[in-house]
Amino acid sequence: MDLCGPIRVASINGKRYVLVIVDDYSRYTWVHFLRTKDETPEVIKNFLKKIYVRLQAHVIIVRTDNGTEFKNHALKEFLDSVGITHKTSAAKTPQQNGVVERRNHTLVEAARTMLIFSHASLFLWAEAIATACYTQNRFIIYRRFNKTPYELIQGRKPDISYLHLFGALCHPKNDREDIGKLGAKGDIGFFIGYSANS
């Protein structure tokens, strides 16, 4: 786990930090966006509970840096209560947490490229990072068992037939009831990411 930020420009939802969580085995990555560092322990607790329910998998070790967002009483108490070992890297040595540090760099670079290429506003950085994470989980970035991170976690190949270019012009259906017979059936928009719930 690693926290990246503060990002100079707040996201469309007022977020300034991104918590990146990488499964060491599959390299599957999750991103969570936060307003402040203080939200970190609660987000981690909720994440670990969801992982246990969704994947029926026990997290054994959590590896972080020595940031105060990770080294605090609330998080230590929770991790101890559920039997999770918390390992931290030595000060000034991000190489000891290299998997997530590298993924941070990859996600930020991909998001920067997507924002520049699509001429999107900088406040869409969170959507760009989430989209980069979503797509990288569905492609082989790091060769492990010749499977994607998604395939290693979900047990099936990902469907990538619906993937689109970030910032692409799109026409979402206008389903308002007040459009009338001659009103526009669709709106004009820009594709800025995938739903986390579908």
Image: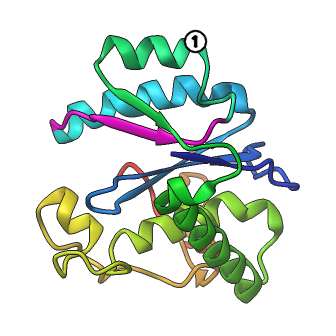
Q: In which quarter of the image is residue 112?
A: bottom right
Q: Quadrant of residue 34?
A: top right
The C terminus appears in which quarter of the rendering? bottom left
Position in image of residue 66 (x %, y %): 63, 36
Amino acid at pointer 1: His
**Magenta stretch: dominant secondary structure:** loop
Residue at image x 78%, y 42%?
A: 14
Q: Name the residue under label 1.
A: 73
* Display coloring: rainbow
Position in image of residue 137 (x %, y %): 37, 68
Q: Nearest the camera: 163 or 157?
A: 157
Position in image of residue 15 (x %, y %): 74, 44
- Label 1 element class: helix
Residue at image x 18%, y 58%?
A: 154
Position in image of residue 180 (x %, y %): 59, 62
What is the crowding at mark 1: few (fewer than 14 residues within 10 Å), some, or many (at least 20)? few
Q: Nearest the camera: 28 or 61?
A: 61
Which residue, as the protein is rendered here, is positioned at the far left? Answer: 155
Q: Give the range drawn in magenta.
A: 56-66
Q: Quadrant of residue 127?
A: bottom right
